[in-house]
Image: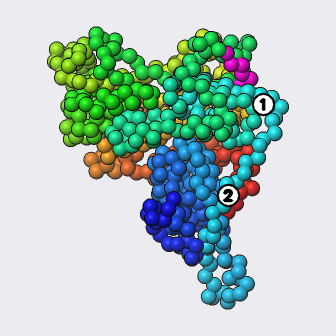
């Protein structure tokens, strides 16, 4: 990061700041040696870490301090103040950590009490805290096979290596491209705000350096649970000691005449996204079938490319079931203000090269069609293997299936939610990554329950909404603030129990809701009112040896 390119604000922390400028539990943005640095104080301890989130670059000083961590305001990644480590996805890389010198003690010795001014100086960037390779505990598998190269699979492979696992790690992905940032596909990449380079989560060098054997276009067709091996479509086999299924979800296909025409697109993989972008380069008029999150994000991105867009959906109010009628009406107006035309309460019956015909008989001209009518979890492999299935692959709190040594994570996993006590399955990026991490820890024998609060976000034009919790059913949605002014909190309750919170441009409220849900989960499970630790015992030990 060069000084010219980085916009720096706040004080030069190498020159020192009075301790009083950083209140207990507060943060101060400054800089050191040309880099933005965040100073954070917890009682007598002062920490300095890199100030920019390693996920999408959010300013961490706008986040929330929780114990000795800071949570990112945008997508709720969590960094250790002691080590800079990314403790929670979606950030996968640490922020830098810096040496802090505190002159209080020196001042106490040489300065008369009445003139003492406590100050802290940020001195130099510190090395990353070295991870100690965990000596294999009894029962640690010699090899791990991960089926799926998406959010959960990638996060699991990385977590295994981060925790010092030295055994064989094989990732088998049916995708033809390396693990990619799916949320970016419908947003930055499709709208042309981000280049194709921004799509891959990691380079091929990363997998090589971390000895993760990544096989692409590698579709697993069967799992032999007694022989502990998987077989691929090409007939090859891979033996495993522990297996993680992270096969994600597949778009529901539209079953109408013309649905297989080349200008009809779906959006799940990087290949899908590239094909759609290629189509968008020459398209003038698009029809988006399905007014889901993906459909609406695609709509916004195509509008950014100045393509006329018509949206067809069976619902009469957008996203009503998930977000409620007020937010649904707001979303419709948001898109209409951007020139989008809706055809709701109807469906497409045929598609030809120039148009889409609706049930009503109306014909919409289209040289590009995008179908986003939902996804189905890819559970056929799990079914074939005889794993317990109930609207997804059933896992316990450790994300282990009913067959010992076989774990499941991400869009396919149906796990016992500690907030409601019900089994839930969600299709969220952050949840999939965190489940991949937790599954990896449990493959290593940590017995770490998955008790993260679900989180997702959506971006359409310059509008952003973040959702914390999970309200499959709710009977009351109360809005505090103003949707119109894009400054509000929507609380979803069922029989008075708060289940989820959606925030519109109120990042701190979203983070506070997450912490509140964590406290409830903690009370529900352990009776401790203080909330559970954000890190496993091994991570706490690791953190304790850090220090700034
Ligand atoms: C365009 C788009 C935008 C999105 N935006 C958001 C967002 O803004 N916020 C949000 O929270 N969520 C978003 N999501 C949802 C999020 O991406 C998913 O919840 C997440 O990717 C799920 O992760 P996963 O690892 O379970 O599955 P995936 O990421 O889908 O990965 C599944 C992997 O399994 C592989 N696979 C499947 N079957 C086999 C097999 N038999 N053998 C080998 N490999 C197999 C696939 O090839 C793939 O590599 C978006 C999704 C899409 C498609
Ligand atoms: S920018 Fe920090 S979590 Fe996304």
Quadrant where the image shows the C terminus: bottom right
Numbered disc 1: secondary structure: loop
Give percent across and percent down for residue 180: 50, 34
Give whichever of 454, 60 is nearer the camera: 60
Secondary structure type for disc 2: loop
Name the dominant secondary structure of the magenta segment. strand
Q: Which residue is mark 1?
A: 140
Tell me, yes or no, whether the highlighted magenta stretch contains residue 19.
no
Q: Are marks 2 and 1 in contact (CB under 8 Å)?
A: no
Q: Is residue 485 left or right of residue 88?
A: left
Q: Quadrant of residue 190?
A: top left
> Nearest the camera: 275 or 325?
275
Chain part drawn in magenta: 237-242
Q: Residue at x 56, y 28 (%)?
A: 149
Instruction: Work out whether 156 lies above or below 406.
Output: below
Task: Mark 2: give few (<14), some (14-19) or many (20+) Cα within 10 Å.
Answer: few
Q: Is mark 2 within 8 Å of ligand 2?
A: no
Could one spot residue 271 in this view of the protein?
A: yes
Residue 325 visible in the snapshot? no
Between label 2 and label 1, give the one nearer the viewer. 2
Residue drawn 50% across the image and 25% down it = 176
* Residue depicted at x 50% and y 29%: 177
Residue 37: percent from the left, percent from the top?
54, 63
Looking at the image, what colour scheme do you see? rainbow
Residue 519 sits in quarter: top right
**Residue that lies at the very extreme toward the left in this rendered image:** 362
In the picture of the structure, the residue carrying the numbered disc 2 is: 127
Q: Which label sits on residue 448?
A: none
**Crowding near the residue tagged with mark 1, few <14, some 14–19, many ≥20 C-alpha atoms within 10 Å:** some
Q: Position of residue 496 (x, y in %)?
A: 45, 37
Image height check: is 232 above or below 284? above
């Amino acid at each position: 990061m060069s000084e010219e390119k980085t916009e720096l604000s706040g004080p030069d922390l190498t020159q020192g700041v009075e301790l009083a400028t950083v209140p207990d539990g507060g943060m101060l943005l400054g800089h050191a040696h040309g880099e933005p640095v965040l100073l954070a104080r917890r009682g007598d301890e002062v920490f300095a870490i890199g100030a920019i989130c390693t996920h999408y670059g959010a300013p961490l000083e706008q986040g929330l301090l929780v114990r000795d961590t800071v949570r990112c305001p945008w997508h709720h990644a969590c960094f250790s103040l002691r080590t800079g480590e990314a403790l929670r996805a979606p950030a996968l890389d640490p922020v830098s950590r810096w040496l802090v010198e505190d002159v209080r003690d020196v001042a106490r010795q040489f300065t008369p009490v009445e003139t003492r001014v406590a100050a802290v100086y940020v001195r130099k960037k510190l090395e990353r805290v070295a991870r100690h390779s965990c000596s294999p505990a009894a029962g640690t598998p010699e090899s791990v096979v991960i089926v799926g190269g998406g959010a959960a699979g990638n996060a699991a492979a990385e977590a295994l290596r981060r925790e010092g696992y030295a055994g064989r790690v094989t990732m088998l992905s049916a995708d033809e491209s390396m693990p990619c940032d799916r949320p970016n596909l419908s947003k930055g990449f499709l709208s042309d705000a981000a280049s194709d380079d921004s799509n891959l989560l990691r380079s091929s060098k990363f997998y090589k350096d971390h000895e993760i054997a990544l096989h692409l276009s590698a579709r697993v067709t069967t799992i032999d649970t007694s022989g502990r091996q998987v077989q691929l479509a090409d007939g090859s086999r891979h033996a495993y000691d522990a297996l993680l299924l992270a096969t994600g979800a597949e778009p529901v296909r539209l079953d109408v005449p013309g649905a297989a025409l080349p200008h009809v697109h779906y959006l799940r993989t990087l290949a899908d996204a590239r094909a759609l972008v290629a189509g968008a380069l020459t398209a003038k008029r698009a029809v988006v079938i399905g007014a889901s999150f993906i459909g609406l994000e695609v709509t916004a991105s195509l509008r950014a490319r100045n393509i006329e867009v018509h949206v067809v959906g069976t619902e009469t109010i957008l996203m009503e079931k998930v977000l409620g009628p007020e937010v649904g009406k707001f979303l419709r107006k948001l898109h209409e203000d951007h020139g989008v035309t809706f055809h709701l309460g109807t469906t497409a019956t045929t598609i030809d090269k120039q148009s889409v015909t609706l049930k009503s008989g109306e014909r919409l001209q289209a040289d590009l069609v995008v179908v986003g009518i939902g996804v189905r979890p890819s559970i056929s492999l799990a079914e074939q293997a005889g794993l317990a299935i109930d609207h997804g692959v059933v896992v316990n709190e450790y994300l282990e299936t009913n067959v010992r040594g076989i774990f499941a994570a991400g869009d396919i996993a149906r796990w016992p939610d500690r907030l409601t006590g019900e089994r839930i399955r969600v299709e969220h990026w952050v949840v999939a990554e965190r489940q991949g991490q937790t599954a990896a820890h449990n493959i290593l024998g940590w017995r770490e329950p998955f008790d993260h609060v679900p989180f997702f976000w959506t971006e359409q034009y310059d509008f952003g909404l973040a959702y914390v919790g999970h309200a499959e059913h709710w009977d009351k949605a109360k809005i505090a603030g103003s949707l119109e002014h894009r400054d509000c909190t929507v609380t979803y309750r069922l029989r008075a129990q708060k289940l989820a919170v959606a925030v519109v441009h109120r990042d701190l409220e979203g983070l506070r809701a997450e912490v509140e849900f964590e406290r409830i989960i903690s009370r529900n499970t352990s009776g401790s009112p203080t909330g559970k630790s954000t890190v496993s015992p091994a991570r706490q030990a690791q953190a304790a040896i850090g220090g700034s």
